Image (cartoon, rainbow, N blue to C red):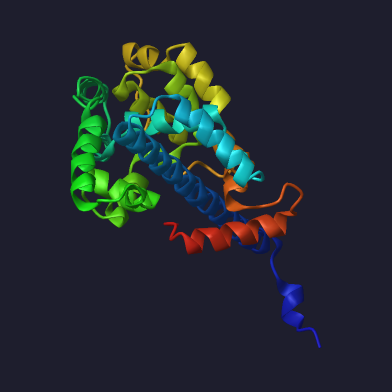
Amino acid sequence: MESNNNHNIDKRNFDAFVHAVGSEIEQAQVRLITAANAQMLFHYWKMGNYILYHQNLHGWGGKIIKKLAQAIRFNYPEKKGYSERNLTYMCQFARLYPLNVLRSFIETDSILSVPNIQNITNEVLKLNSGQFTQELTAQIQSADNQSLEITQEVPAQFQNVEKTVATIYKIKIEDIEDLFLASPVARTNWASHVIMLNGSLPLGVSYWYMKQSVEMGWSSNALKIQIETNLYSRQISNNKVNNFTATLPAPQSDLANYLLKDPYIFDLAGTKEKADERDIEEQLVYRSRWHGCRL
């Protein structure tokens, strides 16, 4: 028998109750898809490092990327994120953000926890002038020597991707993953990264746009417009400061909505094109747990 207490529920209290539950549902959805996005970006970063390593080790030219894309398409026809163009972007992504850059971004995050125009300008200029461009090449060459000393047979040089990346940077892959996921590089979407790669932005300016993309919840199209209209210079000249503290996009932001529909994420997760919403959620939960995503 239904309790009489059910008839005494105050509508305002119930609406507030439902709102709180709904807010948690939205936040959980954003945390889940953001974690999946970060793992996809880490995968792309590892792939880029692995390709660059073997290009250097074997003296392969740029055509190896085209041949790799063809081989992936032949052997894994259901996978759509590994075109020659996208594999090239993965290599650029790895080259632009070697481990020391990720560490510098994390350090800059700490410094800019309470931002002002002066410290933003100082930190952006510091990143712009940093000597990072040759770091990955030097790490790869050092790893080449170590690999050739350890392995005598050519097939043995083709370790799995994570072992190779750990060899390049000489630290455990779990520690590399922690650094990557703690950096702002892991917090925006792949389409936005491609826009920044194509824009050839100075490193510090790229950092600023990454932070603003999450803080303001920009879609990749909005980011493109902001870069083309030189928002960074305009804000600095107008002494305008935004927060740098957001690590997740707001649930209703363009960035969150984009991530929830990002075809790269769902393709990597193995969800079928016509899967219903419940299937997609179950796939993401499973993949996030399996790969140890940090929610």
Taking depth in this image into account, of 42 and 24 the one nearest to the observer is 42
Taking depth in this image into account, of 263 and 80 the one nearest to the observer is 80
How far from the left and from the top, in percent, is residue 57?
Answer: 30, 36
Indicate the quadrant containing the N terminus: top left, top right, bottom left or bottom right.
Answer: bottom right
- Which residue in the rendered view is the most extreme toward the front? 153
- Which residue in the rendered view is the most extreme toward the right? 1
How far from the left and from the top, in percent, is residue 98?
Answer: 29, 35
Q: Is residue 257 visible?
A: no
Q: How many marks?
A: 0
Taking depth in this image into account, of 220 and 47 the one nearest to the observer is 47
Q: Is residue 215 visible?
A: yes
Can you say whether 271 is above or below 121 in the image?
A: below
Can you say whether 174 is above or below 10 in the image?
A: above
How far from the left and from the top, in percent, is residue 30?
Answer: 54, 49
- Which residue in the rendered view is the most extreme toward the bottom? 1
Residue pictured at 63% horizontal, 62% vertical: 282
Residue 79 is left or right of residue 229, and the answer is: right
Residue pictured at 61% horizontal, 46% vertical: 75
Residue pictured at 34% horizontal, 21% vertical: 205
Indicate the quadrant containing the C terminus: top left, top right, bottom left or bottom right.
Answer: bottom left
How far from the left and from the top, in percent, is residue 192?
Answer: 50, 29
Can you say whether 64 is above or below 294 in the image?
A: above
Residue pictured at 57% horizontal, 41% vertical: 72
